[in-house]
Image (spheres, rainbow, N blue to C red):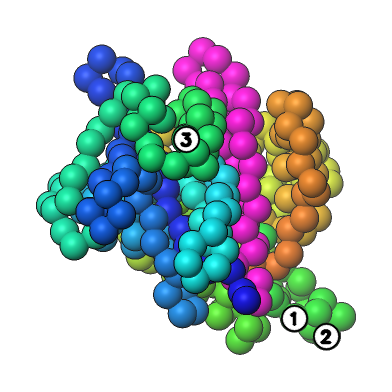
Amino acid sequence: MPALIAAGAAVWRRSPSGDVEVAVVHRPRYDDWSLPKGKVHSGELLPVTAVREVTEEIGHSVTLGPRLGTTRYLVPEGEKVVHYWAARPTGGSFRPNDEVDELRWLPLAKAIDALSHPHDRTLLAGLDGPTAITHTVLLVRHAKAGKSEGWQGDDDLRPLTAAGHRQAEVLRSLLPLFGAQRIYSAPPVRCRQTVEGLAADLGVPIIDEPLLSEDGFLTDPAAALSKLTEIAAGSGGTAVVCSQGGVIPDLVGTLAKQAQLQLLDERSSKGSYWGLYFSGGSSAPLILQAADHYDDAVG
């Protein structure tokens, strides 16, 4: 029997004193305290499920941060697998509903104690890292643009294929869930086309970054890395950077090595993206805290 798939989030905020508070919910059907979550709808991508379910249960819109983990446990219908993100509230208010009749914002230690299930308590114990994050970059590899050998003319002018445009539409729906606000792109047309719909939705320009193209990166890898961290540290919220396959794995690998993070690989399929999460800023250097790879649009 296939597992039941669900998604949710540990939603956290800062209290006026600066302490971390976490949203825990009471479900009258089970008479338990848990983190907001719910089952995936048919054809729905996991990040979409997480945001939708949180909003339905606690009334708050949220921005997703890094993946927090996965829980597995048995229910009468079989095994249930729940994928969780750390998330920040961005608006809204709670009203009791059929699924959740009470919401409490509790300090992290008290939230862990309040949760009814050991798997939830273990998951929430890993929230310290995500609460230290100060800057985010969504590093996107451009969508499909066909094979270069079949293109006549300047390779920088090679456009997206029909499949590439479909990938770009998926990215257009996913990246805002992670707080996308600023858009940067390597100069090739296929890179700009990958994010132009998102830029139109956000009402922001696409800023050209030649250093983050394959040509720019090969000329000066150190300058390209510096440019990426400069973008990360910039004001205006989460940055989307669209680049190329000859750039992304090296950038991600170098950042992970500097931070002593162990990644399984630094893959970068067309239409995939990395969530790069940094701590630091102001007078402190940015340090990569987490790196999540997403290939929901690859298809």
Q: Residue at x 14, y 53 (%)?
A: 96
Viewer-side label of 3, 2:
3
Q: Amino acid at mark 3?
A: Arg
Q: Which residue position is annotated with label 2?
A: 150
- For the stretch drawn in magenta, the main secondary structure is strand
Q: Residue at x 23, y 36 (%)?
A: 104
In primary-sequence order, the first of circles 1 and 3 is 3
Q: Which residue position is annotated with label 3?
A: 121
For disc 2, the neighbor class at 10 Å (few under 14, some 14 to 19, many from 20) is few
Residue 2 placement: quadrant: bottom right
State yes or no: residue 276 in magenta: yes
Q: Which residue position is annotated with label 1?
A: 146
x, y percentage for residue 119? 52, 42
Tell me, yes or no, if residue 4 can be seen here.
yes
In primary-sequence order, the first of circles 3 and 2 is 3
Q: Is residue 243 above or below residue 252?
A: below
x, y percentage for residue 1? 62, 76
Q: Amino acid at mark 2?
A: Gly
For disc 1, the neighbor class at 10 Å (few under 14, some 14 to 19, many from 20) is some
